[in-house]
Amino acid sequence: MAFEITYPRTIEERRPPGHKPKAPRYRLQWDVPVAGLACAYFGFQTKQPDQEAEQVFLHQISSLLGASNKAEATEQMTSLDAEGYRNTIVVAYWGSITAFATWLETSEFRAWFDALASEDGGHGYWFEPFVSHFDRHETIYSEQSYRVGLANLPGTEIRSMNINGYFGAARDRLALSAIDPLESPVPQYSDPVFRAETAGGHVQVSVPHNITILRSGQFWEAAGEEQSRDYLETMKPRLDRGMEYLAQNPTETGCLSIRIATNIDSALEKRSETSTIAAFHSLSYLEEWAASHKTH
């Protein structure tokens, strides 16, 4: 039996009465009760490609993630950021917030990462952890066969659903939205300005309650030539325009950050798979862009 959390609704759902989706969609479900989920992004930055240094980073992170309470699934990506730095990224997943917190406290990662702040080797390192109570997460897939991200955790299965195909479906898929409007405690978003006196050291960023993290994946590795060409020539340019608009208009869209990454294999070769990882000031900002702007 699939585990899920439901609440008696005090907030009306967005689904129109009698709605039936035109296309099948799927979501991730667990076979056992889950309190919360965690994922962490570990990044290595360099201005010029440096495969040797990138491989050293990947090996070090892999070793650290293999410690007690180790990550249950990982992925590797590469991304070019707005400052022109090449980022080599490892994403790690835990099916338990406690396991992640224990790993963070007991592994050698903190000491290793803190020591990097004083290095001056022309490289940068960053760490972005995300934790979510189970009732604050949602997933949607177009196919059952493709597993990515959280779907690689043990004890999971991709099952059909019907909470899709209408505006507001993403909110409805969040169990907590039945009793919580998920509003930001800071109503108005303003584009922050970060200043660093030197290239060394680490900058810590804190975000307000109820920010929205979205990962949208694209996978065409198994597509035929005609489908791949259609995606690359027709669909991808439209996707890129939308992401460019979000990146260039953070105040209007409430987009705190956006990163377009390409999955890579162990040899650092790019795969036919990309992910857009975006953070929004609140779910309402994401909904407003999706409902009203031509780039969605």
Image (tube, helix red, strand yellow):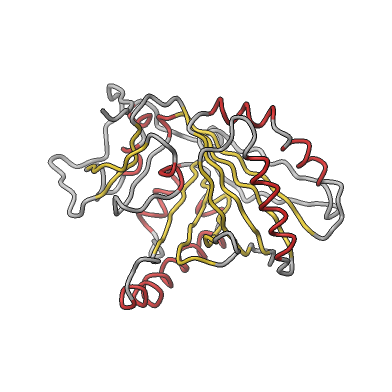
Identity of the residue drawn at 46% across and 50% down: 215
Q: Tell whether 82 sits left or right of 137.
A: right
- Residue nearest the observer in this picture, 295 or 131: 131
Q: Quadrant of residue 88?
A: bottom right
Question: Would you place residue 106 above or below residue 14 in this image?
Answer: above
Residue 211, given in percent of the width and then of the height, sits at 52, 39
Q: Tell whether 251 sits left or right of 27.
A: right
Q: Quadrant of residue 113?
A: top right
Identity of the residue drawn at 34% across and 43% down: 170
Identity of the residue drawn at 76% across and 55% down: 124
Q: Can you say which quadrant of the picture contains the C terminus? A: bottom left
Residue 159, given in percent of the width and then of the height, sits at 27, 41
Identity of the residue drawn at 29% across and 48% down: 167
Question: Would you place residue 215 above or below residue 34 in this image?
Answer: below
- Residue nearest the observer in this picture, 93 or 288: 93
Total tally of numbered discs in the picture: 0
Residue 284, given in percent of the width and then of the height, sits at 43, 43
Q: Residue at the far top: name it.
A: 8
Question: Would you place residue 197 above or below residue 81 in this image?
Answer: above
- Residue nearest the observer in this picture, 63 or 160: 63
Q: Tell whether 154 sits left or right of 192.
A: left
Q: Residue at the far left: name it.
A: 18
Q: Quadrant of residue 242?
A: bottom left
Q: Can you say which quadrant of the picture contains the N terminus? A: top left
Residue 109, given in percent of the width and then of the height, sits at 72, 38
